[in-house]
Amino acid sequence: MDILLIAGLWLDGSAWDDVAAALRSHGHRPVPLTLPGQGDGSADATLEDQLAAVLDAVDAADGKPVVVGHSAAATLAWLAADARPDKIAKAVLVGGFPAEDGKPYAGFFELRDGVMPFPGWGPFEGPDSADLDEQAKSAFAAAAIPVPGGVATGIVRLSDERRFDVPVLVVCPEFTPAEAKEWISAGDVPELARVKHLDFADLDSGHWPMHTRPAELARLLAAAADPA
């Protein structure tokens, strides 16, 4: 099965290299996406541009793909489910939750000169980065791609109620399934509260398991794709 891989902020498609290799060994076809503005040099890219790239990949897939969104890109995966509810087998959200309609995509950090640069490791101290050593942190920061302001501040638009029919798997790295369920029950993630087929998988890692637990993450994604 085709498995579309969408990395979160500051990352391009190469973030999935190790996961993709493992997925191939499981018999699946990984499709890592390098999004407009996050790897192709177009600093003026918008959220709409990134969604269009994801939808192009969905439309080009062999059959119904699994769409994987990491971190902020959980929202991109969910936007794809909204736009193509009949063409997606499952949405997998890794370490992230979809934003609501009308909310900014990723207004988390300050924009500078029209882009949102990687803010350093201060905001990610603790469980997010506990499994990254100093060498890995330095490499990540050096390779981080500033996110275009038109992406970070883009407004999420959701319109098709059939998105709630798309099965969803929430992969829980730096938080637990119990915590995720509590947040959803408390109303903090209203989109997932309405999903009809919602599952959770625990993964003992920090926020970037594609770097620190690629084999384990690939096994979870393969298992998610097999029954789909």
Image: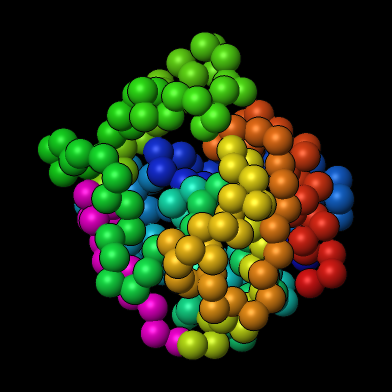
Query: Residue 174 location, x and y as percent?
Result: 59, 38
In this rendering, would 110 be left or right of 199?
A: left
Is 124 inside the magenta-drawn segment? no
In this rendering, would 118 be left or right of 33?
A: left
- Can residue 138 be seen in this snapshot? yes
Q: Residue furthest left?
A: 113
Q: Give, as a single range, the part of the protein colored magenta.
A: 149-160
Q: Main secondary structure of the magenta part?
A: loop
Residue lying at 20% horizontally and 39% vertically, measured from the top left: 110
> Which corner quadrant holds the N terminus?
bottom right
Q: Residue furthest top?
A: 134
Is 155 inside the magenta-drawn segment? yes
Query: Residue 42 location, x and y as percent?
Result: 29, 48
Query: Residue 78 location, x and y as percent?
Result: 50, 68
> Which corner quadrant holds the C terminus?
bottom right
Residue lying at 54% horizontally and 66% vertically, measured from the top left: 185
In this rendering, would 24 be left or right of 125?
A: right
Q: Would you identify the image quadrant in which residue 120 lies?
A: top left
Q: Looking at the image, which is closer to me, 177 or 6?
A: 177
Q: Looking at the image, which is closer to me, 206 or 51?
A: 206
Q: Looking at the image, which is closer to me, 39 or 101?
A: 101
Query: Residue 34 location, x and y as percent?
Result: 48, 49
- Can residue 98 be seen in this snapshot? no
Q: Would you identify the image quadrant in which residue 203 lies?
A: top right
- Above or below, 98 relative to 72: below
> How is the protein colored in the picture?
rainbow
Residue lying at 37% horizontally and 69% vertically, measured from the top left: 100
- Above or below, 113 relative to 4: above
Residue lying at 51% horizontally and 52% vertically, measured from the top left: 96
